[in-house]
Amino acid sequence: MNAKPRTYRQFWPIYVGVHTKRATRVIHFAGTSAAIVCLLLALLTLNAWWLLAVPIAGYGGAWFSHAFVERNKPATFTHPLWSLIADFHMYWLIWQGRMDAEVARILGGDEVPQRDRAGEADRVREHQDPARNHTR
């Protein structure tokens, strides 16, 4: 998909494509969770200083994971609003245990990048077709 996305539906596969490694998604999940906690603390304590921590918690780990784990450029820089929406979309799919399957679907079925073979491909295949789990 070389053309610039004009809708969120077109953007989602691009977002998933820059979050192929499980470690990246886990760090994003932790950062989003921390950002939500900071927002709740700001509301509960009426202390606006917690609001400063929201983007630091949310983006700090995410950008670290893109630089040192995924080794790519965050989608935030090209599509900030869609990236924020996609982060919560991914967050929800992770909560549901469906993000690994979504990555496999977007990447074309069973294909999970070779550089992230720490068992994820096997888990995705088992999720898609339990009968293929004949080696375990």
Image: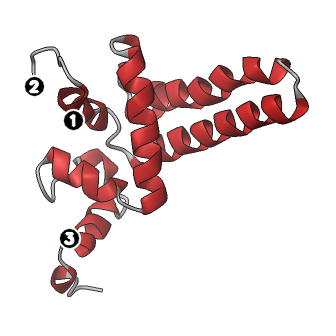
Give the secondary structure at mark 2: loop
Q: Is residue 65 left or right of residue 83?
A: right
Which of the two residues, 91 or 44, is positioned nearer the viewer here? 44
Dot placed on the residue nearer the N-terminal end, 2 or 3:
2
Residue 20: image location, x then y, percent = 31, 42
Q: Can residue 74 be seen by looking at this rendering?
A: no
State the CA–CA distance, disc 3 to disc 1: 19 Å
Q: Which residue is drawn at 27% across and 68% down?
A: 122
Q: Which amino acid does label 3 sit on?
A: Gln
Is 74 in front, or is 32? 32
> Which residue is located at x 20 percent, y 32 percent?
9
Up-down: is 6 above or below 41? above
Q: Any mark on residue 13, and which?
A: 1
Which element carries disc 1, helix, strand or loop? Answer: helix
Quarter of the figure with residue 83: top left
Q: Which residue is drawn at 27% across and 72% down?
A: 127
Residue sitting nearer the eye, 22 or 116: 22
Q: Do the residues labelled 2 and 1 touch (CB within 8 Å)?
A: yes
The colour scheme used to paint the residues is secondary structure
Q: Mark 2 points at which residue?
A: 1
Q: In which quarter of the image is the C terminus?
A: bottom left
For mark 3, what is the residue? Answer: 128
Q: Is the residue 49 above or below the residue 71 in the image? A: above
Residue 104 seen from this side: yes
